[in-house]
Amino acid sequence: MKLAWRCWASGTVHYENLRRNPLAQLAYIADVNTARAAELAAAVPGCKPVASFDDVLAAEASHSDASQRLQAVIVCTPTLTHFELVIKALEAGLGVFVEKPLSLDIAQIDRAYALAKERNVPLLTGYQRRFDPNFSAVAEQVKSSDIGDVHVMRSTSRDNPVPSVEFLKTSGGIIHDCGSHDIDLVRWIVGEDPVAVSCMGSCFNKDIAALDDHDTIVISLRFPSGALGTIDLSRHACYGYGTIRGGARSLSLLVALADTPFDVGRPTNRGARHQGNAASRQRSRHHGHSIDALGPLVRSELLLVPAAIPRCLSHRGRALYHGSRVGLH
């Protein structure tokens, strides 16, 4: 699969995964910082550095051999540039993996997925935690019919260290930048869309407060089945980056931590017993698994439907939930 890569903050993770992935041939690196693009491209045989995605499209237009043409694009640029680049790629008939959020505007998200369906090309938004083996194990346990119904679903995330002010200015805020991951996973694991959502937020970092954003939020959700969900997020944590998912069920307690073995506490006549999975995975590998998912879709020309795009709008302590797409189950 021949790809072009448009880079920004998370781009380094994708770049390293693409270099290691035998299914991918990195053909272009586009970055306004041309010196950086040249440095990264030099480490990949046959890769060309360019200043913009328009340069990529112009170069591809000269290819007469269809087998050598670009097949997909990885977009990991500032949030506010995602939609324009995604539309350009889809109109060129290219598959797209785009870092979340695809856009901060619901109408733009609708337009992008409608265009992907119309052109019959894959569009995958990067909710890579679905590819984390520990979280996937939790989802599989919940879908099992022998361990009861979900009563409470809790998600805790700590985005430490605090991102740079330069990044935060274009991130779309903590709900879009961080909370969308948790909303996606809670919906996916519970298997339902919430019918009621409330949110409270605070800000303890003066630089983040100056951006009219929060650094700490708590989201409460109620699902049609009666299950309750809570999500708490913070940009601060003395122990570093971390994510935890937990689900209280009628017959068991499930807990999963990113990059650690998955534990299920099952009740017995002697109390709870615990069982874990094999080795943990590094966070960067989850991105690699999500990139792997794009390859077969490009080759078979299938459309990957939207993966849980949360419609949350926040403003100084309030959040409105407007429904969301069908997730991948």
Image (cartoon, grey):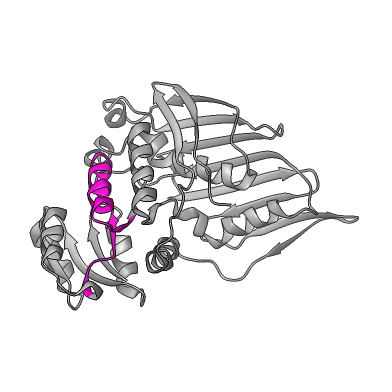
Q: Is residue 160 left or right of residue 231?
A: left
Residue 292: x and y in percent read: 42, 67
Q: Is residue 249 left or right of residue 260?
A: right
Identify the residue at image location x=46%, y=24%.
319
Q: Nearer the viewer, residue 207 or 238?
A: 207
Identify the residue at image location x=50%, y=25%.
199
Q: Point out the stretch of residues depicted in magenta.
A: 68-96
Residue 174: x and y in percent read: 39, 35
Q: Is residue 240 left or right of residue 246?
A: left
Q: Is residue 69 magenta?
A: yes
Identify the residue at image location x=64%, y=40%.
153
Q: Is residue 218 magenta?
A: no
Residue 299: x and y in percent read: 38, 69
Q: How many marks?
A: 0
Vertical position of residue 209 compared to residue 302: above or below: above
Residue 1: x and y in percent read: 32, 71
Q: Is residue 9 left or right of residue 290?
A: left
Q: Quadrant of residue 229?
A: top right
Vertical position of residue 208 compared to residue 158: above or below: above
Q: Nearer the viewer, residue 305 or 261?
A: 305
Identify the residue at image location x=45%, y=26%.
201
Vertical position of residue 45 compared to residue 233: above or below: below
